[in-house]
């Protein structure tokens, strides 16, 4: 059972379509204009003028949109200049249509003799309407562009996290594979073919599980323990009685989600420094407890302690610990805690603290 924890962009509201907004806007303009002129005592048939002007505005701004789309990709100064010219031209066309409609409907038989300031007033009023329309158009367009850029940035960030997680996970496999194959060849040379065959089978099962698992996935702790048992089965064939393993898993924690194979490099580190370098071998203990809304994991050994590991400047232990720490940071951010410390009288305790979460549908 896997549960993806890839950080995804928050769902964005559906993008508003141009045509529903265009129809709604000019319908509202017609209703407001018609009720206003009727309220002022103008003849009811003047509604036809309002309707004609609204239809004309709908058509003119639809054509204006095509012009704006043509200049959108130009450099900002040039785009602004051409957009302003288109706006003025569209307003002049709308004003001319208004005068023609009034002539056609006999509301302005002597329009030409009217004060030119009245035409200027109408031009400015329509310019304000078209300017508002243009501001809304460009505002929505810029908002869409900004949203798309943010989504693209989040997708790029997610892709980078994916690549980083895969790199962190798979950089450990060649070292483990080399050690295991080397142990198998040693068993064959020592004529311990049955043990070598069992190790090959265990290695095959573990590698299949490792390749099938995704470093971006979280799995129930019980599944993670099954994977550890595959790994430990290989190591116990190598070390025999020198490797002792104990697991103290609180039942409530078995369904808790943890990053896939997050414990394997820590186990590998403990085996390398607490077991393989000591003739008497060593003991590894895994403890899992629930602490309110957090999951506490302790991986302990009874080896010489962390100071000896520190003497290795570029050892695999450093890679394993840094690997686990970085994976947890990428997956959980500040919601996780990872600490390595020495035990008394000797040994190492690797403590991982994660949010306690279970897969959906799990009881």
Image (tube, grey):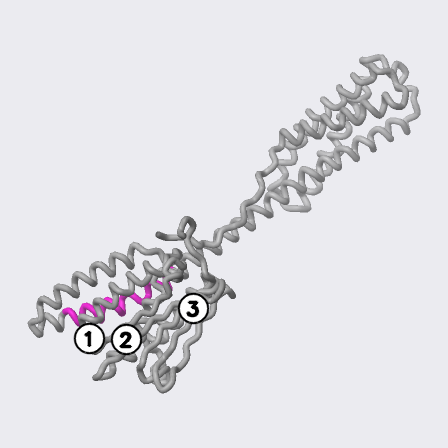
Report, in whole angstroms, how far the alpha carbon at label 3 lies from the one at label 2.
21 Å
Secondary structure beneath disc 2?
Answer: helix
Sequence order check: which comes first, mark 2 or mark 1?
Answer: 1
Sequence order check: which comes first, mark 3 or mark 1?
Answer: 1
Sort mark 1 into few (<14), some (14-19) or many (20+) by Cα contacts within 10 Å: some
Secondary structure beneath disc 1?
Answer: helix
Sort mark 3 into few (<14), some (14-19) or many (20+) by Cα contacts within 10 Å: some
Residue 271's mark? 2
**Residue 201 location (% of width, % of height):** 17, 61
Secondary structure mostly seen in the magenta stretch: helix
214 relative to 32, above or below = below
Q: Which residues are magenta?
A: 166-184
Secondary structure beneath disc 3?
Answer: strand
Q: Give the labeled residue for mark 1.
A: 239
Q: Is residue 171 magenta?
A: yes
Classify residue 165 by image quadrant: bottom left
Q: Residue furthest bottom?
A: 345
**Residue 130 location (% of width, % of height):** 75, 33
Residue 156's mark? none
Classify residue 138 by image quadrant: top right
Q: Is residue 93 magenta?
A: no
Q: Give the labeled residue for mark 3.
A: 296
Please tell me which residue is depicted at 36% across the width and 60% down the height of the picture. Answer: 254
Q: Is residue 274 left or right of residue 337?
A: left
């Amino acid at each position: 059972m896997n549960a993806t924890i890839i950080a995804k962009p928050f769902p964005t509201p559906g993008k508003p379509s141009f045509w529903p907004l265009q129809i709604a806007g000019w319908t509202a303009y017609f209703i407001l204009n018609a009720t206003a002129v009727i309220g002022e005592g103008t003849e009811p048939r003047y509604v036809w003028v309002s309707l004609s002007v609204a239809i004309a505005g709908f058509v003119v701004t639809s054509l204006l949109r095509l012009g704006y789309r043509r200049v959108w990709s130009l450099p900002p100064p040039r785009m602004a200049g051409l957009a302003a010219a288109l706006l003025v031209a569209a307003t002049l066309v709308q004003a001319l249509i208004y005068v023609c409609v009034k002539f056609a409907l006999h509301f302005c038989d002597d329009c030409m003799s009217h004060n030119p300031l009245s035409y200027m007033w109408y031009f400015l009023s329509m310019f304000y309407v078209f300017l508002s329309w243009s501001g809304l158009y460009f505002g929505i367009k810029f908002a869409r562009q900004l949203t798309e850029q943010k989504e693209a940035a989040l997708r790029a960030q997610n892709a980078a996290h994916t690549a980083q997680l895969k790199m962190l996970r798979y950089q450990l496999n060649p070292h483990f594979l080399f050690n295991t194959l080397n142990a198998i060849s040693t068993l064959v040379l020592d004529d311990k073919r049955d043990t070598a065959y069992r190790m090959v089978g265990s290695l095959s099962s573990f590698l299949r599980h490792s390749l099938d698992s995704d470093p971006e996935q979280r799995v129930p702790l019980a599944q993670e323990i099954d994977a550890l048992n595959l790994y430990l089965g290989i190591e116990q064939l190598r070390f025999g009685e020198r490797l002792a393993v104990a697991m103290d898993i609180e039942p409530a924690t078995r369904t808790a989600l943890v990053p896939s194979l997050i414990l394997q490099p820590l186990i590998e580190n403990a085996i390398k420094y607490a077991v393989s370098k000591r003739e008497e071998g060593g003991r590894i203990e895994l403890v899992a407890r629930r602490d309110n809304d957090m999951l506490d994991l302790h991986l302990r050994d009874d080896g010489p302690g962390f100071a000896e590991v520190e003497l290795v400047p570029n050892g695999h232990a450093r890679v394993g610990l840094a690997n686990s720490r970085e994976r947890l940071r990428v997956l959980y951010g500040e919601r996780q805690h990872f600490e390595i410390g020495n035990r008394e009288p000797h040994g190492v305790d690797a403590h991982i603290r994660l949010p306690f979460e279970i897969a959906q549908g799990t009881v």
